[in-house]
Amino acid sequence: MDKIIIQGGRRLEGEIENSGAKNAALPVIAASLLTKGWNSFANIPNLVDIRTIKTLLGSFGVVFAQEGSTLRVNAGDIVSCLAAYDLVRTMRASVLVLGPLVARMGEARVSLPGGCAIGARPVNLHIRALQDMGAEVELQDGYVVAKARRLKGAEIYFDMVTVTGTENIMMAATLAEGTTILKNAAREPEVVNLADILIGMGARIAGVGTDVVRIDGVPSLHPVEGVVIADRIEAGTFMIAAGIVGGDVRIRGCHPGHHDALIAKLRDAGLKIETGEDFVRAVGRGRPRSVDVKTLAYPGFPTDLQAQFMSLMTVAGGLSVITETIFENRFMHVSELMRMGADIVVQGGSAIVKGTPALQGAPVMATDLRASASLILAGLAAEGITELSRVYHLDRGYERIEEKFARLGAAIERVKA
C-alpha cells in the first residue's frame, strides 16, 4: 500500500492544469446508458472511481475506447441490468446507473452503494422519485430492484437537496412519457454539465441551474460529443494550499465562477485572489486570518472543501468555527490534524479551531477522500516530516496530486509501504 511523504515548510509557486471533475465525469459516463452508439466525452480524469464505473458499465455489456483524456463509450448492447455488490460497494456514485437502466431497459437491480464513510446519504430519495414515476421498486437482499414498462412524468419534490438524486432522476425522466418537474433540485455545476450533455443527446430540459428543473420526455436519445467541466474541488484544494504555505499558485483551465463562495472566504482570510476567463491565481500573504465557514448546497461553501479549509484555519491567527451541514460524519480528519498539533474542539456539527503558529509533522492516516487532501495541506505547512497512509482514498478523486504539488515546489513523494 502506497504512502505519501511530505517534508513541510516549502513555499509553493507556479502553475498547474486543472483536471476534469470526477463528480461530473461519473454521471456523464452513466448517461451513456441512455443511448445506442458511440458517445465521446473529453476531459475525463484518470482516477480510481472512473475505472470503477467503467468496470461496472462493462459488466452490463458497455464497451470503451480511451484516447488520452477522451473516453468513447458505446452502450448499444446492454446484456445485464445487475450492478453487483462487489463493484458498487467502493463507490456511492454507482447508484447513478439506476435511473438510466430503468428508463431505457425497463429494469435495474443495483446494490445499495458504499464509498467514503462520511454520512448516510440514503438512496430513499431516488427510490421514492422512481415510484412517483410509476416504477415498482423494492429492496431485496441489499439490492434496489426497480421495474417499469415505461416511466411516467411526475412532479418530484426532494425533501433535501441531493446531487446524485437530481442527476439520477433527471436522466430517468429524459425517456419518460410526459413531463417531469424536479423541485428543490441541486444546482451544482456538475448537474448543469450533465444536463448540457443530455440536451446534446436530444433531451428536452429547462431550468437547469435553478431549484426547479423541467424535463419533457422523448422516445429516444442519440450519442453525443461532450466535455466534462474542470474539477472545482481540485482547484479549490490548490487555492487553499497557497494560503497555508504562503505561496503563489495559478490554476489554469478552471471555471472561476464556480468558486465564488470559496474565493470570498479566502479573501476574508487574507489571500489575494485574481481571476481570469479560465484561471484563478491564489497568493498567500503572511499568516492567514481566522474565518468562520458553514457548508451549504451550491452556491454555498462546498462540503468537499470543508476539511481542506479546516487545515488552513489550524495555522490561522485567531479562532474560527467550521459548521458542517451536509454530512454528519465529516469531521473524521480532526483527530489526525490534532496529531499534528492542531487545536480543535468538535461540538455537534461544528468544529472550533484555534489557530497555532505551526503544525508538527507526524504519521497520519486518511479516513476519506477529502480528509486525505486536508492532511496533505497540513503536511505542507508542518515542521518536519508527515507520513500519510491509506492514500487509496486520495486516488479516488485527485489525479496525480503529489506530482502537481512537486511541480509547485513541494517536497512530496509517493512511496511503496
Image: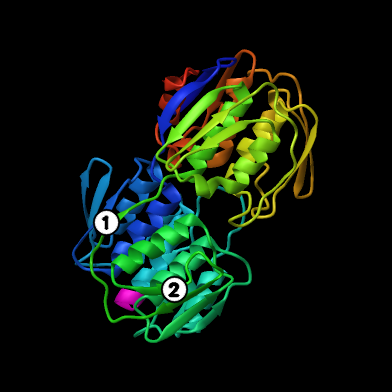
Q: Position of residue 180 (x, y in %)?
A: 46, 81
Q: Nearer the viewer, mark 2 or mark 1?
A: 2
The reply to whether the magenta stretch includes residue 105 is yes
Q: Determine the CA span between mark 2 and mark 1.
A: 31 Å
Instruction: Please indicate, yes or no, whether residue 48 appears anywhere in the rendered image.
Output: yes
When the figure is inspected, residue 32 is found, relative to residue 293, above or below; the finding is below
Which picture quadrant has residue 272? top right
310 relative to 105 in the view: left or right: right
Res 320 → quadrant = top right
What residue is shown with label 1?
58
Q: In the drawing, does residue 265 fall left or right of residue 373?
A: right
- Asked whether the residues under the numbered discs 2 and 1 touch, taking CB atoms below 8 Å apart as contact, a structural biologist would say no
Inspect the image, locate mark 2, and give the three-letter code of the amino acid beneath it. Ala
In the shown orientation, is residue 372 left or right of residue 217? right
Stretch of the chain drawn in magenta: 103-107
Residue 278 appears in which quarter of the rendering?
top left
Q: Is residue 107 visible?
A: no
Which residue is at the front of the view, 353 or 291? 291
Residue 263 image position (x, y, % from top left): 60, 41
For the point 44% across and 67% down, the residue is 168
